[in-house]
Image (cartoon, helix red, strand yellow):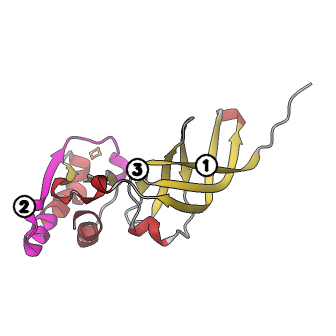
Amino acid sequence: MVALYPLVSQFTITGKLEDLRVKSNGRVKYLLLSDKEKDYWIKVPKEQPEFLSQHLKLGCVLKIAGMQKHKIHQGKVEYKAYGIELLATPPLEQTSDKTRAKVLFCQSSSCWNKGGKVACELLKEELERRQITEQVEIKTTGCLKKCKQAPNVVMLPDKIHYGGIQPQQIPLLIDKHLI
Ligand code: FES
């Protein structure tokens, strides 16, 4: 007799936010949530709670409800959220040390030539204009293996990756991660 499993069912997972995938327009596309048993990449709906774009930090605790779909032939499960609740923010020391802020720009050709260089120069100008150059370190890196999303930028210490960054987004990134 063959055991039957539902292909689609509900889930509720409470865990720590370990990573994010953010689209170039700032919308969060995937969250990596970790509970005591395993890690889950969870797709986030287009209609997102306000805190996702405003206050989401790695290390915060989220409770996510959604639907899981078993892809039997591929041997994997897809998770799609419909409800996201912020249960706890990370300890203060992880979020308040803005003197350690860093911005990493991929300097390999795909990223650098597709707007990374322009965005990097604009960031320097904007930091100078706001007189916060001393608080932010700008570094260039080799290929981050996300060339399809070029140009790529990573904001530290928040560890948020942005692909397809546009120069006009630089002021928003400063507001969100560097001050
Ligand atoms: S060239 Fe930038 S991620 Fe590969």
Cα distance in 3D space between marks 1 and 2 = 41 Å
Front one among 13 and 108: 13
Front one among 165 and 15: 15
Residue 72 percent location from the top left of the image: 71, 35
Q: In the rendered image, which residue does mark 2 sit on?
A: 134
Residue 82 percent location from the top left of the image: 63, 62
Question: Which residue occupies 31% across, 57% down?
Answer: 92
Q: Earlier in the sequence, mark 1 or mark 3?
A: 1
Q: Earlier in the sequence, mark 1 or mark 2?
A: 1
The residue carrying pointer 3 sits among few (fewer than 14), some (14 to 19) or many (20 or more) residues within 10 Å by Cα, namely: many
- Amino acid of disc 2: Glu
Position of 74 with respect to 116 (left or right) is right
> What is the span of residues highlighted in magenta in the rendered image?
122-151
Q: In the rendered image, which residue does mark 1 sit on?
A: 13
Disc 1 is placed on an element classified as: strand
Farthest residue in the right direction? 1
Front one among 61 and 44: 61
Asked if 141 appears above or below 179 in the picture, the reply is above
Q: Quadrant of ligand 1?
A: top left
Q: In the rendered image, which residue does mark 3 sit on?
A: 59
Question: Which residue occupies 28% across, 53% down?
Answer: 93
Asked if 35 appears above or below 170 in the picture, the reply is above
Position of 69 with respect to 94 (left or right) is right
The residue carrying pointer 1 sits among few (fewer than 14), some (14 to 19) or many (20 or more) residues within 10 Å by Cα, namely: some
- Amino acid of disc 1: Ile
Asked if 141 appears above or below 44 in the picture, the reply is above
Question: Which residue occupies 54% across, 41% down?
Answer: 35
Cα distance in 3D space between marks 2 and 3 = 26 Å
Front one among 102 and 96: 96
